[in-house]
Image: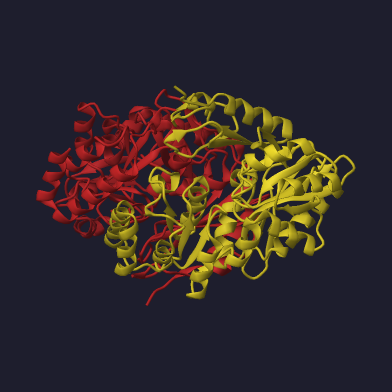
Chain colours: A red, B yellow
Amino acid sequence: MNRTFASCAAINSDANVHEVIDRNFEQQRGAPTAAVRIGIIGGGQLSTMTARAAHALGCRVTVLEKDPHSPGALLLPGVIIGDWADPAVLAGMASQVDVLTFENEFVDAGALQILEEAGHAVFPTSACLAVTQDKLRQKEALVGAGLAVPRFCAVASPEDIVGAGTQFGWPVVLKTRRNGYDGKGNATVSSAMAANAAWNGLGGDRNALYVEAYFPFSRELAVIVTRGRNGEIATYPVVETFQRDHVCHTVSAPAAIAPELAVRAANLARQAVAAVGAIGTFGVEMFLSTAGDIAINELAPRVHNSGHYTIEACECSQFENHVRAVVGWPLGSPRMLAPAAVMVNLLGTGTAPGRPLGLEHALAVRGARVHLYGKTTSGSGRKMGHVTALGDSTGDARTAAEEAAGRISFENR
Amino acid sequence: MNRTFASCAAINSDANVHEVIDRNFEQQRGAPTAAVRIGIIGGGQLSTMTARAAHALGCRVTVLEKDPHSPGALLLPGVIIGDWADPAVLAGMASQVDVLTFENEFVDAGALQILEEAGHAVFPTSACLAVTQDKLRQKEALVGAGLAVPRFCAVASPEDIVGAGTQFGWPVVLKTRRNGYDGKGNATVSSAMAANAAWNGLGGDRNALYVEAYFPFSRELAVIVTRGRNGEIATYPVVETFQRDHVCHTVSAPAAIAPELAVRAANLARQAVAAVGAIGTFGVEMFLSTAGDIAINELAPRVHNSGHYTIEACECSQFENHVRAVVGWPLGSPRMLAPAAVMVNLLGTGTAPGRPLGLEHALAVRGARVHLYGKTTSGSGRKMGHVTALGDSTGDARTAAEEAAGRISFENR
């Protein structure tokens, strides 16, 4: 153990100071514990929402995160400030917990595989992460399982983009295979003339890219699926997601679609997570065409923004079910407690301290459930919180959620 | 600040080590924060459940607690390990937060008054705490407001107990004015002959005692009431509580009583918290006689075991409303989301590590919501967790909650 932390110190002495403090802190506070200890790689809001569910079940949580001002580092007692790209840091964390999981898909799957080979429990597994974090391999796995996705192909040059456009028809969507999110790493290419610029824009010379056919969707759907270590599956309701500037803006649960479509979407989502060997909670994003065709857009191998509504709206939230799944406990029910729920994201509008303005007015909106992530800095489009409202109808829920969300802004000076 | 902590060190060097570590920890992790900072005196499960609600609203929480193995110390990042009876420790905490509150009523009201006089916000106020933590003064305040309580009188000797028994009729209940809970500090005195033994049993020579007439109740009711800084009131449903060995065993919400009785009980609870100048969430325990008379048993100036069901069953929990009240935000709705809810406490049966046995079986019970407090040691009758179930009927909810609770035990070797 000391060796591990000494090796961290050689790389980042600041991080080491934090770790030693955290570890002293924990040793002094904590008796030898009978509690299940969960390690979460990544300290964003997904880590704190997961940790709250874990704490309520008597678990201990340790978060590994570079940023000492992240929600996880600020709001949780067990924090290792360090770089998850550093195998020694990961090994140090693994030695302190019973099971490791992650709240973002940007962790190196190879590093996790080393932990697994050393006997540590990691869920989702490194093999699952390796497939899902690479969108090209993810699509290949889905196609391999016979599931519908937009047509796609790898591209190694601007010429390949032109070839794909000729084959699929224009426009096509050029994407980075890894590390894209919220529209980052995506570019719509409308014609052969735009291929060079798109290639350069996404750094094609250094980033692996691929092309997808444009799917003429009428709606975007999502399903949260939790899959347990024994293969048990909890499927949450099919929801409709509404993006603004490529960022999830609102989620409406359940989606106002024909029951037959909902059944198909749910089945597709279940098959998709099984196809990648998922364990834990996954978000499955789908496209619905006007003709009623459903194709998988992408899987996120983690709790997902489209499932935040489950905290209030479902018997067991996506976060609690993730904890249950990775620990190996039976899953809770994804049943909704109200006929409808709407979630609205609270996004920053500029770089500034994260002070929420208007919170007291938002809290006065009947039925609105406000969540703030405690971020100390807002950024343009940065997810700072969300509001969920339940209702007897989607309209009721939307009215309350939008009203409350509209009353909150983040200081922007 | 350094002076404050230096003075702590003079009294308790261990505590000081923890404080310095916590403070370094916070300083290193935390940027100057725009978040509302809440200090909670006491680190039991009520602190962690309150903190989870506060964190979800973007607040920071600091807990002050002697026991480094308490839930608050183990599960929260901001902890001061120290003695709340020490004014310097309280002052140190007050300097770090925007508002102070407490999760038990055993804090010295005089020490809180000093903080108020120094300009710190403390809710409930020291004046309210002084009245409610002394059950004799509490009863005097309720009677002064014209509210029904069992007859009572102060006693200064065993002879006074006999006098009370003669006046009220036997049996009477002898109680300590302060620091009683879960049946501790109470003794039923069945006749004049038992007065001496009861007096000695409760340490009458060193503890201030009083006597209450025995109230021949058919049921015990409770109401959670939150009162905001502006006097706004949220009244939760009237529930029925069931004790076992003087400890709350189960809570059924709403109580199966005539609507007229429920209205009277709710009104009485509202008037009671107003009578003591409550700010924050209070638990009001009441007796109901077969004749339909309702009398107040006692007020707890804090979130209360009879309100744990509100986490899942109500739109806004007693914990979130406590946070809203003490910060000065509008209150949330206490409306129930299901027709019925039943909560069952999980109690320890002996002194042992707090390892829960059978948790995985309990989690398999459909509809049961399991809460474990993360205590590292169980004790006979110690509250280790609770289970809540919602249902279309009380019977449904009770079946699920009892089934799940019955599957969990705590290691007892």
- B18 over A113 or under it: above or below: below
* Residue A97 x/y as whole percent: 30, 35
- Residue B367, quarter of picture: top right
- Quadrant assignment for the N terminus of chain A: top left
Seen as rendered, the residue at the extreme bottom is A413
* Residue A121 x/y as whole percent: 30, 29
- Residue B13, quarter of picture: bottom left
Residue at position x 21%, y 49% in the image: A20
Left or right, B229 with respect to A126, comes to right
* Residue A198 x/y as whole percent: 24, 57
Q: Is residue A300 visible?
A: no
Residues A81 and B218: in front is B218
- B211 over B125 or under it: above or below: above
Residues A57 and B222: in front is B222
Left or right, B119 with respect to B403, comes to left
Seen as rendered, the residue at the extreme left is A10
Label total for image: 0
Left or right, B194 with respect to B378, comes to right
* Residue A403 x/y as whole percent: 59, 65
- Quadrant assignment for the C terminus of chain A: bottom left
- A277 over B17 or under it: above or below: above
Q: Is residue B78 visible?
A: yes
Seen as rendered, the residue at the extreme right is B291
Residues A146 and B139: in front is B139
